[in-house]
Image (cartoon, grey):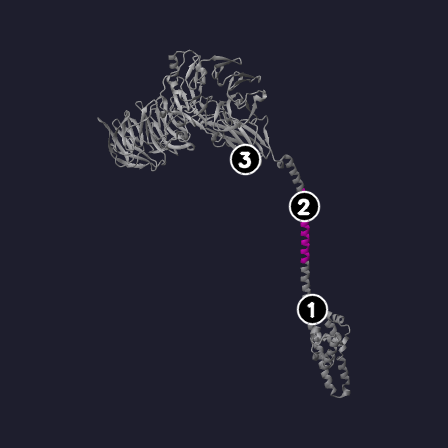
Amino acid sequence: MSRSSFFTLFLLFVILKVNSQELPLINRFSPENYHAESQNWSISQSENGYIYVANNKGLLEFNGASWDLYPTPNQTIMRSVKAHENKIFTGFYMDFGYWQKDEFGILNYTSLVKENNIKLLSDEQFWNIIELDGWILFQSLQRIYIYNLSSDLVKVINSDSTITKMFKVDDSVYFQKFGKGIFKIEKGISKLLSDKKELRDNIVVLIYKNNQKLVFLTQGNGFYTTEDEFELNSELTKFLKDKSIYNAKQLSDGSFVIGTISNGAFYLKSTGEIQYVLNQENGLSNNTVLTTFEDKKGDIWLGLDNGINKIDVTSSFRIFKDPNGTLGTVYTASYFNGYLYLGTNQGLFAKKYPSSDKFSFIKNTQGQVWSLDIVDDTLFCGHNNGTFIVNNTEVNLISTIDGAWGVKQISNNKLLQGNYDGLYIMEKSSNGWMLSHKIEGFNNSCKFFEIHHNNTVFVNHEYKGVYKLKIDQDFKNVLDVKIDSSITKGVHSSIVKYQNNIIYAYKGGVFRYFDKAGKFARDTMLDKLILKEDFLSGKIIFDKQSNKLFSFSQENINYLRPDKFSAHSIITRKGVSNSLRKGAVGYENIQMLPENKYLLGTLNGYILTDLKVSDKLNYELSITGIKNNSVNGAPKQLKLYNDNTLELSPKYNSLEFSYSVPYLSTDAPVKYQYQLEGYTNDWSNWSYENKVLFENLFFGEYKFKVRAKIGDDLVENIPSYEFIINRAWYISNFAIAGYVLIVFVFSLFMDRLYKRYYRKQREDLLRKQEREFQLKSLESEKELMEIRNTQLKQDVDSKNRELAVSTMSMIKKNELLSSLKKEIMRGDEKSLKQVIKIIDNNLNDTDDWQMFKEAFNNADKDFINKLKKMHNNLTPNDLRLCAYLRLNLSSKEIAPLLNISPRSVEVKRYRLRKKIDLPHNVNLTNYILDI
């Protein structure tokens, strides 16, 4: 190869100003993210898109959502990894072999050294692995082991000097023996390819082909070929000479990535132009690059001395960062006359575009820049200090009125400007554009304003609402001011003119002003620009150059454009999350640049992108793990695939599902949504979480399903997993049958018990009723007895009265007869004997006694019998006396009845007391009455 052709091919020029780089996105993974040690020596990718990394701690697996660590079996540093088909080959200290997933989705290790009884050299480590045509080559510093995938046989290539590197170029394998040269493996045997001094004594870090000829990149002395002529003094070689190159890789598009020990990584175009310098200052986690790798999509992975970084070179996004704060927050931008202008909170900056030049500060623009508007082929700069006209890298102050928000064209020689304190008119004369006057009658801030027909101006004030101003023909005075009541005010709201319509947007939606109705109404088409569930800001921007209407949400940039083949408009969503944009909310800005690129201002720089919705590769969503949690036990992995539906014990009724899409770019986040049939028929809300836990599931049949979307694009496949949670033993069919039997027996028992109970209740009721009947009968008898007793009492009272009358009659009779007898006895004895005899006969007390006794017994029939029982020694005369005492008669009243004197009655009473042995302190009459 000639010197000129090589130089033309590989190096055009090396011009790089690091501080003005627009770099691809860098996704950084720290040891805290992947839960292993800091150093990462080798990277590979499996057919399903998973990333595997050889780490000091072991093998790392990244499924696009989460990292898993598989420790090195012998607890040593893992140095190399190569994914091939369904196996992950690894090499480390004193062992090499492969990992393969089991039915649970877990990687298990198989040692090829042990399986093949290979005797390794002392302290042998395996630094590189290559696959070629069914062979796997493992390289240590002393040997290359060639493993046949079909026969499992292992061949060994020995070296008498250190093997520094091994390379695969097309269908051939090359390696370097330090001090010996470059060798090629042919039919399992190493053959010397070149022993040139430059290839013997310089460590080769890359071999690739250029025009079917091998090119070698050495660690410190640049590029060589096997031809007689080689590059030694090129500018690129000089640039790389002191950069401590450790590794390099040619990418699929012909470009290169070079990793260094202390200077980060260099990304070179296929032409040799250094496109990016990536280091810790501008985004890398560390400046020591131990390995480089290109994934299937074409992005670059760097294994670092402290972490893992992924460089999204295939993404349309490029980031310009201002880590030192020189630029500040970008509020507006413009491309004009070959310059890119940035308006920031620090002032106005410019540079030639496209170029790698630094941005230059434009003198006299220190302070807040609010707007850059191109009108009448003139660039106006709205500034906190006034209004400037920009000419290349110089400015001309045309207004000193503080707070110029922006300008709108009224006519060819008249502009309307919004300021902090109202509206102003700019006019064009022979001397150019100058401030003319303020429009009187309105003094509110006019950050967002638009000119409608008939001298009507709409002004949106975020805290007060939308003003409708009627201005006179000369634009000197506001004739009428009204706040539109048909719409609601809103923070971060905006107003814009689109297709001659006034459009207002805020959190509640997008509204269009209708002249006939004189009010705003919701526009169903434009309303799709503002999604409530994804709302961030009501700021909308109309870009005249691209004829697009933009809005900004949490996850997307949304834009509306007219359809080329119909009268309708099309809304497209470009996945650019706010976490990536990092702009000031309410001050979002977007500017079209040449080659259909767009600039988005951020808090510390800007982002460049295009609006093409990237074609997603055919990514597949998969369930990566299922953990089964028992009540008391540790989590247990379940099989990912089963011939039959998995049945689980009821105590294992909590399951955790993990799932992922191996989409490894950061420009569009992956979201997941799941459903568990048998538990709920609804899909969950979209979430970034790639796992879900279901706890305490009831027995039954379940089907878990999950789906994903990348940005707004759904991943096609929806994986599912079916399982059954069996009934607990106490609710099994056998148990239920037992329960039914128990219930049946219990029912019979209870039936009998109830029958017995009710029979007893009935018997008790009958007994109760019988008792009540008896009680009622007794009560009736009692009442009858009381009636009888009353009757008897009445009879006794009647008899007593009769007895009393009879007694009194007898007493009166006897007294009368006694008196007659006395009087008669005073007369003639003979003549009166017969009369006296008759009287004596009538005074016969025996008959009187019998008659009295009969009447007394009728009145008090039990008394005589009771008295006889108590005192059986009483004579009939004693009983007669007791009867008279029973009637409570005095001695004087008793005397005539006994036909004796009262004195004799007292004597009888005394004798009676003696017979009945009555104490002296007891009254005889009371005693007789109490019997």
Is there a contact, CB below 8 Å, between mark 2 and mark 1? no
Amino acid type, mark 3: Glu
What secondary structure is marked by label 2? helix
* Residue density around tag 1, few if under 14, some if 14–19, many if 20 or more, within 10 Å: some
Question: To which residue does mark 1 refer?
Answer: 795
Q: Is residue 407 visible?
A: no
Disc nearer the start of the sequence (2/1): 2
Q: In the image, is residue 557 above or below residue 5? A: below
Magenta stretch: give its range: 748-776
| Residue 753 counted in the magenta span | yes
Quarter holding the N terminus is top left
Question: To which residue does mark 3 refer?
Answer: 695
Disc nearer the start of the sequence (1/3): 3
Disc nearer the start of the sequence (2/3): 3
Question: To which residue does mark 2 refer?
Answer: 753
Q: CA distance from mark 2 to mark 1?
A: 59 Å
